[in-house]
């Protein structure tokens, strides 16, 4: 057998294998080494320079033993796995118990610092390895868990900072913060013990938000970056709260130049029922409150909010308290909070992460040659299929929900995560109306195709939704091809209708419809990219039609805050490091594009109030929605919805560069199968539309690149 373990054994030391065998220098034939395990097993195994096992015991027995010390095998998990819910610290005023899963370590010490902002170690405690072994009950399988109990109150004031020092059988040592840390020092290098009753929770905070929708198809989400949202002085947010958790929920702010409500009040005015917050956990780029700009997709400590968004980052309690304050404010306003999470990779050098330093060779996916899989294009892929990696992800999302009341999770590069893990996330939140959705792109990670949580496998994980890149491209186009709203498109109207009716994934509720998020060009930039010679009025029509198509589609709906008032990034399609000049929202645009903002409010209200735009099964689509016009190459789509109030709604989307006339007295139009000549639109109860729509003599004229929704009562 070859390449099934790793021995640092040039001196014939007693060691544990790690990843692969290593031939012994200066030996032509064989060597022997004794392996000793915590369960009392002792083996003498002989291995030649080609990695072949030769032993006085049965080779099969030797292989089984070696596998349970090889981090990349199922046997390792079977032997060492732990399912207890007490990793990290468990605090009481009388004592704190700290536990770390580190099965391959020879010894572990707990380092206690003078304070969270001190680098002086004041005390060192030896941690003890567990002695209970159970293959069948991993809650009792403590042989890989190290623990120590500290007598006294370690959570008072601003808490107690700690780290681990680990020594491995080959003699190498590591030092790291706790992978399970829930509070951090400034900069995120130390874990901190806190008393949960000592300034961590604002009055009235609850994790039980009553406003969660009972179907994802009712979710209307606005994406924000904590920093971008209020960093500009045009936000009117208090100086010390700009780019902070508290700035994101400051009420009463106004644009200092024109006076419109900004920030939190603007989000409330749109009618959204969720916000999606870009990464707000501890990151390598953000924890030191750095002036360097970052989106935060470089995870450092997954279970702790970043100190970079706290007004007092030197106090470990500040980020926790202020994040809860922000969440409470949105909940009080009837808006749920979805969290952008990044479990597919870690930031920085994976070999320096708390995971690698705690259990070397375990937490990251590898290629056949031993190199790190890099399907995330960030240097590493988290090995979610491993028992303790999967447990960490599950423990983490449950921590955020149970501690902060998070109402949904947006998973970055979900295609890196295996489907078994995703199924267990589904099960963990079953019946709680927690939104689960993510990027289902097929990433080139070292994982079998059928195990990736990607678009093509949506049927395996029916409670998880996916960003519908197909509908996005159909509406706004790609770099090489304009879409329905941005020019002459080769997309077929019949295909656009399929996406409009949420047919791209296994379940209708799995379709998340959008045209703009933080990455790629903004909608406004994209429209200018395809149509640089447009006048402002034509550009406005393109903006309004694209926004309407997101809200008038079946499925979930998502916008980026600022999309409603023509946010631009100077054509930057990946502004993760472009700084505040490019990324900070310019709230002056509320003045310049008030009409587009109001049109956004109108279509959001329609989506939120019309149940027939929130359908969950295709049988109901067939019952309540009829597509009246979808002639390919017409650039016109219209439909009739049998409304939930007993009336009907006629919706027409005109992506062409000439007007469309429908209703009484309208002339035949070769682009239309039906132009509603039997309908007198003068008697409509209401109409919402782009600015280039007029009504006269029972007919409606929808200008080039425009839309209309006309409602009739029952």
Image (tube, rainbow, N blue to C red):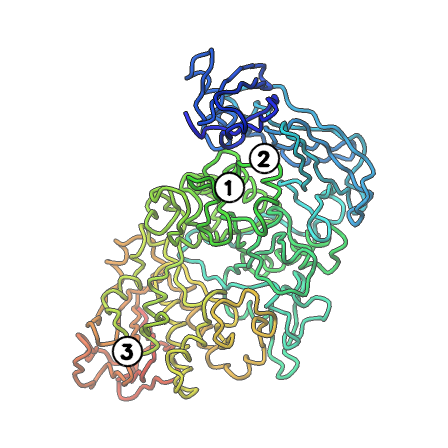
How far, Cα to Cα, is label 2 from label 3? Answer: 55 Å
For residue 263, side relative to residue 192 (left or right) = left
Residue displayed at 62% across by 47% down: 301
Residue 364's label in the rendered image is 1
Total tally of numbered discs in the picture: 3
Mark 3 element type: loop
Mark 3 surroundings within 10 Å by alpha-carbon count, few (fewer than 14), some (14 through 19), many (20 or more): some
User: Which residue is pictured at 70% across the width and 48% down the height?
Assistant: 189
Question: How far from the left and from the top, in percent, is residue 391?
Answer: 52, 36
Q: Counting residues from the N terminus, which is met first, the one under dot 1 or under dot 3?
A: 1
Compare marks 1 and 2 and give the one earlier in the sequence. Answer: 2
Alpha carbons under labels 1 and 2: distance apart: 10 Å
Tell me how far mark 1 sits from mark 3, CA to CA.
Answer: 46 Å
Q: Where is residue 567 in the image (x, y as percent from the top left)?
A: 51, 75
Q: State the residue in front, 545 or 102.
A: 102
Q: Quadrant of residue 179 in the image?
A: top right
Residue wearing tag 2: 359
Q: Position of residue 679 (x, y in %)?
A: 23, 78
Q: In the picture, which quadrant includes the C terminus?
A: bottom left
Q: Which of marks 2 and 3 is nearer the N terminus?
A: 2
Q: Name the residue under label 3.
A: 488
Q: Is residue 146 left or right of residue 517?
A: right
Q: Which mark is residue 684?
A: none
In the displayed structure, 527 sits above or below 88; it is below
Q: Do the residues labelled 2 and 3 touch (CB within 8 Å)?
A: no
Residue 639 picture location, percent across and down: 26, 69
Question: Which quadrant is home to the N terminus?
Answer: top left
């Amino acid at each position: 057998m070859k390449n099934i373990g790793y021995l640092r054994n040039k001196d014939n030391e007693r060691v544990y294998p790690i990843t692969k065998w290593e031939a012994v220098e200066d030996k032509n034939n064989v060597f022997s080494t004794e392996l000793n395990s915590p369960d009392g097993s002792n083996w003498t195994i002989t291995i030649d320079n080609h990695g072949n096992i030769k032993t006085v015991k049965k080779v099969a027995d030797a292989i089984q033993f070696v596998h349970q010390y090889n981090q990349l095998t199922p046997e390792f998990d079977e032997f060492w796995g732990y399912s207890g819910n007490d990793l990290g610290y468990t605090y009481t005023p009388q004592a704190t118990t700290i536990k770390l899963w580190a099965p391959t370590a020879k010894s572990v010490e707990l380092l206690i610092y003078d304070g969270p902002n001190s680098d002086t170690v004041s005390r060192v405690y030896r941690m003890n390895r567990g002695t209970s072994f159970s293959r069948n009950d991993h809650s009792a399988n403590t042989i890989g868990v190290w623990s120590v109990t500290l007598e006294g109150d370690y959570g008072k004031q601003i808490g107690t900072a700690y780290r681990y020092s680990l020594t491995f059988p080959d003699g190498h040592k590591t030092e790291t913060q706790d992978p399970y840390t829930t509070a951090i020092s400034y900069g995120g290098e130390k874990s901190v013990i806190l008393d949960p009753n000592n300034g961590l929770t604002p009055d009235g905070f609850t994790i039980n938000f009553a406003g969660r929708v009972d179907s994802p198809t009712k979710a209307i989400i606005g994406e924000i970056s904590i920093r971008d949202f209020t960093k500009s002085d045009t936000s009117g947010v208090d100086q010390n709260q700009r780019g902070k958790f508290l700035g994101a929920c400051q009420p009463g702010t106004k644009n200092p130049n024109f006076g419109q409500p900004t920030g939190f009040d603007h989000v409330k005015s749109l009618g959204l029922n969720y916000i999606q917050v870009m990464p707000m956990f501890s990151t390598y780029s953000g924890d030191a409150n750095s002036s360097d700009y970052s989106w935060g997709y470089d995870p450092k400590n997954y279970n702790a909010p970043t100190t970079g968004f706290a007004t007092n980052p030197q106090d470990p309690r500040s980020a926790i308290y202020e994040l809860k304050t922000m969440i409470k404010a949105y909940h009080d306003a009837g808006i749920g909070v979805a969290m952008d999470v990044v479990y597919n990779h870690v930031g920085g050098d994976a070999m320096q992460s708390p995971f690698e330093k705690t259990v070397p060779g375990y937490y990251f996916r590898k290629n056949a040659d031993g190199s790190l899989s890099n399907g995330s294009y960030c240097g590493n892929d988290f090995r979610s299929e491993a028992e303790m990696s999967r447990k960490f992800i599950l423990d983490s999302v449950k921590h955020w929900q149970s501690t902060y009341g998070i109402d949904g999770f947006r998973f970055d590069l979900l295609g890196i995560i295996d489907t078994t893990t995703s199924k267990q996330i589904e099960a963990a939140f079953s019946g709680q109306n927690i939104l689960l959705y993510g990027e289902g792109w097929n990433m080139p990670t070292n994982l079998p195709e059928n195990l990736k949580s990607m678009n093509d496998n949506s049927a395996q994980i029916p409670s998880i939704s996916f960003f519908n890149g197909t509908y996005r491209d159909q509406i706004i186009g790609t770099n090489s091809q304009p879409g329905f709203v941005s020019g002459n498109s080769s997309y077929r109207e019949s295909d656009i209708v399929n996406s409009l009716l949420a047919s791209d994934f296994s379940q209708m509720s799995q379709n998340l419809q959008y045209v703009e998020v933080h990455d790629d060009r903004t909608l406004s930039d994209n429209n200018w990219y395809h149509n640089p010679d447009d006048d402002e009025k034509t550009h406005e029509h393109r903006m309004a039609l694209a926004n309407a198509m997101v809200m008038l589609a079946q499925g979930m709906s998502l916008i980026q805050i600022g999309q409603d008032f023509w946010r631009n990034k100077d054509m930057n399609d990946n502004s993760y490091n472009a700084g505040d000049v490019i990324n900070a929202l310019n709230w002056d645009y509320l003045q310049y594009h008030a009409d587009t903002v109001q049109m956004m409010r109108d279509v959001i209200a329609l989506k939120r109030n019309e149940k027939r735009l929130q359908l969950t099964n295709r049988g109901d689509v067939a019952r309540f929605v009829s597509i009246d016009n979808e002639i390919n190459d017409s650039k016109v789509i219209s439909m009739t919805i049998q409304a939930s109030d007993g009336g009907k709604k006629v919706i027409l989307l005109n992506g062409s560069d000439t007007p469309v006339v429908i209703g009484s007295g309208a002339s035949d139009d070769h682009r239309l199968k039906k132009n509603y000549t039997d309908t007198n639109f003068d008697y409509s109860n209401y109409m919402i539309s782009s600015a280039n729509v007029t009504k006269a003599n029972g007919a409606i004229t929808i200008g080039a690149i425009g839309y209309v929704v006309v409602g009739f009562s029952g």
